[in-house]
Protein backbone atom coordinates (compact mmCIF):
# COMPACT_ATOMS: atom_id res chain seq x y z
CA UNK A 1 0.00 0.00 0.00
CA UNK A 2 1.17 3.51 -0.78
CA UNK A 3 1.88 5.55 2.33
CA UNK A 4 1.70 9.31 2.01
CA UNK A 5 4.56 11.43 3.29
CA UNK A 6 2.98 13.91 5.71
CA UNK A 7 4.68 16.87 7.34
CA UNK A 8 3.26 16.63 10.84
CA UNK A 9 4.68 19.15 13.31
CA UNK A 10 6.05 17.81 16.59
CA UNK A 11 3.51 17.88 19.37
CA UNK A 12 4.11 19.69 22.64
CA UNK A 13 4.36 16.24 24.26
CA UNK A 14 7.21 15.24 21.94
CA UNK A 15 9.00 18.55 22.47
CA UNK A 16 8.84 18.15 26.25
CA UNK A 17 10.29 14.63 25.97
CA UNK A 18 13.05 15.96 23.70
CA UNK A 19 13.96 18.70 26.18
CA UNK A 20 14.04 16.30 29.13
CA UNK A 21 15.88 13.45 27.39
CA UNK A 22 18.27 15.64 25.42
CA UNK A 23 18.87 17.96 28.36
CA UNK A 24 19.77 15.19 30.82
CA UNK A 25 21.91 13.49 28.19
CA UNK A 26 23.87 16.69 27.47
CA UNK A 27 24.24 17.32 31.23
CA UNK A 28 25.70 13.82 31.66
CA UNK A 29 28.27 14.52 28.93
CA UNK A 30 29.19 17.84 30.56
CA UNK A 31 29.47 16.03 33.90
CA UNK A 32 31.97 13.60 32.37
CA UNK A 33 34.15 16.49 31.21
CA UNK A 34 33.88 18.34 34.53
CA UNK A 35 34.74 15.23 36.57
CA UNK A 36 37.33 13.74 34.17
CA UNK A 37 40.37 15.00 36.10
CA UNK A 38 39.01 13.71 39.42
CA UNK A 39 38.28 10.21 38.14
CA UNK A 40 40.58 7.28 38.90
CA UNK A 41 42.06 5.37 35.97
CA UNK A 42 39.60 2.50 36.52
CA UNK A 43 35.86 2.97 36.50
CA UNK A 44 32.92 0.53 36.51
CA UNK A 45 32.76 -1.12 33.10
CA UNK A 46 29.76 -3.41 33.57
CA UNK A 47 27.03 -4.23 36.07
CA UNK A 48 25.32 -7.54 36.82
CA UNK A 49 21.55 -8.01 37.19
CA UNK A 50 21.74 -7.01 40.86
CA UNK A 51 23.35 -3.70 39.93
CA UNK A 52 26.78 -4.62 41.28
CA UNK A 53 29.97 -3.83 39.40
CA UNK A 54 31.22 -7.04 37.81
CA UNK A 55 33.94 -5.52 35.61
CA UNK A 56 36.19 -2.50 35.91
CA UNK A 57 37.74 -0.78 32.93
CA UNK A 58 39.61 2.28 31.71
CA UNK A 59 37.96 5.64 32.23
CA UNK A 60 37.97 5.99 28.43
CA UNK A 61 35.08 3.51 28.54
CA UNK A 62 33.00 6.27 30.10
CA UNK A 63 32.77 7.77 26.61
CA UNK A 64 31.03 4.71 25.13
CA UNK A 65 27.53 5.58 26.38
CA UNK A 66 27.65 9.16 25.06
CA UNK A 67 28.70 7.89 21.62
CA UNK A 68 25.97 5.24 21.57
CA UNK A 69 23.47 7.82 22.86
CA UNK A 70 24.46 10.31 20.18
CA UNK A 71 24.11 7.62 17.51
CA UNK A 72 20.64 6.68 18.84
CA UNK A 73 19.63 10.33 19.09
CA UNK A 74 20.51 10.90 15.42
CA UNK A 75 19.16 7.59 14.08
CA UNK A 76 15.88 7.62 15.99
CA UNK A 77 15.48 11.35 15.30
CA UNK A 78 15.70 10.59 11.58
CA UNK A 79 13.18 7.75 11.94
CA UNK A 80 10.83 10.12 13.77
CA UNK A 81 10.84 12.33 10.68
CA UNK A 82 9.82 9.39 8.48
CA UNK A 83 6.73 7.82 10.08
CA UNK A 84 5.69 6.55 6.64
CA UNK A 85 8.54 4.02 6.94
CA UNK A 86 7.27 2.58 10.25
CA UNK A 87 5.33 -0.68 10.45
CA UNK A 88 1.52 -0.46 10.59
CA UNK A 89 -1.43 -2.84 10.59
CA UNK A 90 -3.23 -3.59 7.33
CA UNK A 91 -6.14 -1.33 8.35
CA UNK A 92 -4.04 1.80 7.68
CA UNK A 93 -5.95 4.01 5.23
CA UNK A 94 -6.38 7.64 4.20
CA UNK A 95 -8.78 8.40 7.04
CA UNK A 96 -6.53 7.12 9.85
CA UNK A 97 -3.02 7.59 8.47
CA UNK A 98 -2.36 10.76 10.48
CA UNK A 99 -3.41 9.10 13.76
CA UNK A 100 -1.18 6.09 13.05
CA UNK A 101 1.79 8.29 12.13
CA UNK A 102 1.44 10.43 15.27
CA UNK A 103 1.03 7.42 17.53
CA UNK A 104 4.06 5.68 16.06
CA UNK A 105 6.18 8.81 16.16
CA UNK A 106 5.23 9.57 19.77
CA UNK A 107 6.19 6.05 20.85
CA UNK A 108 9.52 6.28 19.06
CA UNK A 109 10.13 9.70 20.63
CA UNK A 110 9.46 8.31 24.11
CA UNK A 111 11.77 5.34 23.59
CA UNK A 112 14.54 7.56 22.17
CA UNK A 113 14.38 9.93 25.11
CA UNK A 114 14.04 7.18 27.70
CA UNK A 115 17.25 5.66 26.29
CA UNK A 116 18.99 9.03 26.64
CA UNK A 117 17.72 9.39 30.23
CA UNK A 118 18.85 5.83 30.98
CA UNK A 119 22.33 6.49 29.55
CA UNK A 120 22.57 9.72 31.57
CA UNK A 121 21.59 7.89 34.78
CA UNK A 122 24.12 5.13 34.16
CA UNK A 123 26.84 7.70 33.42
CA UNK A 124 26.13 9.66 36.61
CA UNK A 125 26.15 6.47 38.67
CA UNK A 126 29.35 5.14 37.06
CA UNK A 127 31.11 8.36 38.04
CA UNK A 128 29.70 8.22 41.58
CA UNK A 129 30.92 4.63 41.97
CA UNK A 130 34.35 5.46 40.54
CA UNK A 131 34.68 8.30 43.06
CA UNK A 132 33.62 6.06 45.96
CA UNK A 133 30.33 7.91 46.52
CA UNK A 134 28.28 4.78 45.81
CA UNK A 135 28.94 1.03 45.77
CA UNK A 136 26.59 -0.11 43.01
CA UNK A 137 23.92 1.00 40.59
CA UNK A 138 21.19 -0.52 42.77
CA UNK A 139 19.11 -3.70 42.64
CA UNK A 140 16.12 -1.61 41.58
CA UNK A 141 17.79 -0.35 38.40
CA UNK A 142 17.03 -3.33 36.14
CA UNK A 143 13.32 -3.57 37.09
CA UNK A 144 12.92 0.18 36.50
CA UNK A 145 14.62 -0.08 33.10
CA UNK A 146 12.32 -2.94 32.10
CA UNK A 147 9.26 -0.98 33.21
CA UNK A 148 10.50 2.16 31.41
CA UNK A 149 10.79 0.17 28.19
CA UNK A 150 7.50 -1.69 28.61
CA UNK A 151 5.30 1.35 29.30
CA UNK A 152 5.73 3.11 25.92
CA UNK A 153 5.34 -0.20 24.09
CA UNK A 154 2.13 -1.07 25.93
CA UNK A 155 0.82 2.50 25.52
CA UNK A 156 1.56 2.34 21.78
CA UNK A 157 -0.19 -1.01 21.35
CA UNK A 158 -3.27 0.18 23.26
CA UNK A 159 -3.39 3.45 21.30
CA UNK A 160 -2.98 1.57 18.00
CA UNK A 161 -5.91 -0.72 18.84
CA UNK A 162 -8.10 2.36 19.47
CA UNK A 163 -7.42 3.87 16.05
CA UNK A 164 -10.34 3.14 13.73
Image (tube, rainbow, N blue to C red):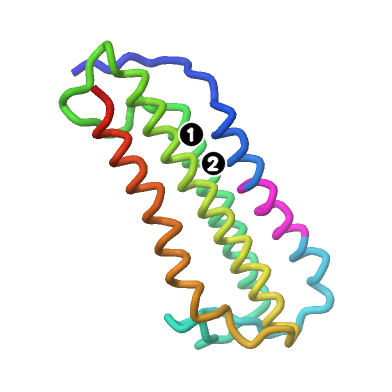
Task: Check disc 1 and report the residue beneath it.
Answer: 78
- Secondary structure mostly taken by the magenta-highlighted segment of the chain: helix
Q: Is residue 147 left or right of residue 96?
A: right
How crowded is the residue under tag 2: few (<14 C-alpha within 10 Å), some, or many (20+)?
few
Q: In percent of the image, x 32 and y 35: which residue is there?
A: 159
The disc label shown at residue 91, or none: none
Q: Secondary structure at mark 2?
A: helix
Residue 3 quadrant: top left
Q: In percent of the image, x 54 and y 47: which residue is there?
A: 113
Image quarter (top left, top right, bottom left or bottom right) of the C terminus = top left
Where is residue 43 drawn, in percent x and y?
65, 82
Q: Which residues are magenta?
A: 21-30
Q: Is residue 69 left or right of residue 130?
A: left
Vertical side of 77 occupied by 24: above or below:
below
Vertical side of 124 occupied by 19: above or below:
above
Where is residue 90 drawn, in percent x and y?
16, 26
Extreme-left residue of the structure: 90
Q: Nearer the viewer, residue 73 or 110?
A: 110
Q: Is residue 22 left or right of residue 96?
A: right
Q: Are marks 2 and 1 in contact (CB under 8 Å)?
A: yes
Extreme-top residue of the structure: 94
Task: Check disc 2 and report the residue beneath it.
Answer: 74
Q: Secondary structure at mark 1?
A: helix
Amino acid sequence: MYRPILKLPKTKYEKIWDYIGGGLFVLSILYIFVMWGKLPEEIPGHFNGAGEVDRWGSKIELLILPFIGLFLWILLGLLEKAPHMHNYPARLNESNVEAFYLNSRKGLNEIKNLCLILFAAITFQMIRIALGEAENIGWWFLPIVLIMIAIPIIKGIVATKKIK
